[in-house]
């Protein structure tokens, strides 16, 4: 049993409002919660998110760790073959 007069008022059907529309109800200590973003309009959840490749950072990362189809960094540093090793001797 909670102590009287120390807990905030609990609203079991608090309305979550985004852009003037009620998007869901939840329990809260406030009767209305106003939000700017929720899962219904966030780009990650709606599938409209785009990766911004500033200055080719993604491509540079892929090349650095050999994950891309553009070639691997280790191509220039491969071990010499047996014939190359004999020719150097």
Image (cartoon, grey):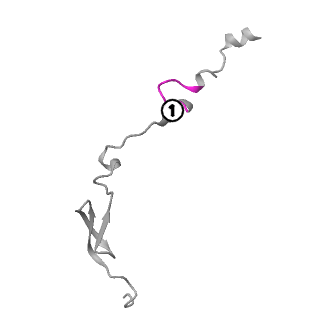
Q: Residue 80 magenta-drawn?
A: no
Image: magenta residue range = 65-73
Q: Nearer the viewer, residue 80 or 73?
A: 73
Quarter of the picture containing the N terminus is bottom left
Q: Position of residue 50 (x, y in %)?
A: 37, 40
The residue tagged 1 is: 62
| Farthest top residue in view | 87
Q: Position of residue 71 (x, y in %)?
A: 52, 23
Kindly indicate the quadrant of the structure image that contains residue 48: top left
Q: Is residue 21 left or right of residue 33?
A: left
Q: Is residue 74 left or right of residue 5?
A: right
Quarter of the picture containing the C terminus is top right
Q: Residue at x 65, y 20 (%)?
A: 79
Q: Residue at x 53, y 29 (%)?
A: 63
Q: Nearer the viewer, residue 56 or 28?
A: 56
Q: Residues within 10 Å of mark 1 (few under 14, many from 20)?
A: some
Q: Residue at x 43, y 39 (%)?
A: 52
């Amino acid at each position: 049993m909670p102590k009287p007069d120390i807990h905030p008022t609990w609203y079991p059907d608090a309305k979550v409002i985004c852009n003037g529309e009620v998007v869901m109800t939840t329990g809260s200590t406030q009767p209305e919660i106003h939000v700017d973003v929720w899962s219904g309009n966030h780009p990650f959840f709606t599938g409209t998110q785009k990766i911004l490749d500033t200055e080719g950072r993604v491509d540079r990362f892929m090349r650095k760790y050999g994950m891309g189809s553009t070639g691997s960094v280790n191509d220039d540093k491969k071990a010499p073959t047996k014939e190359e090793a004999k020719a150097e001797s």
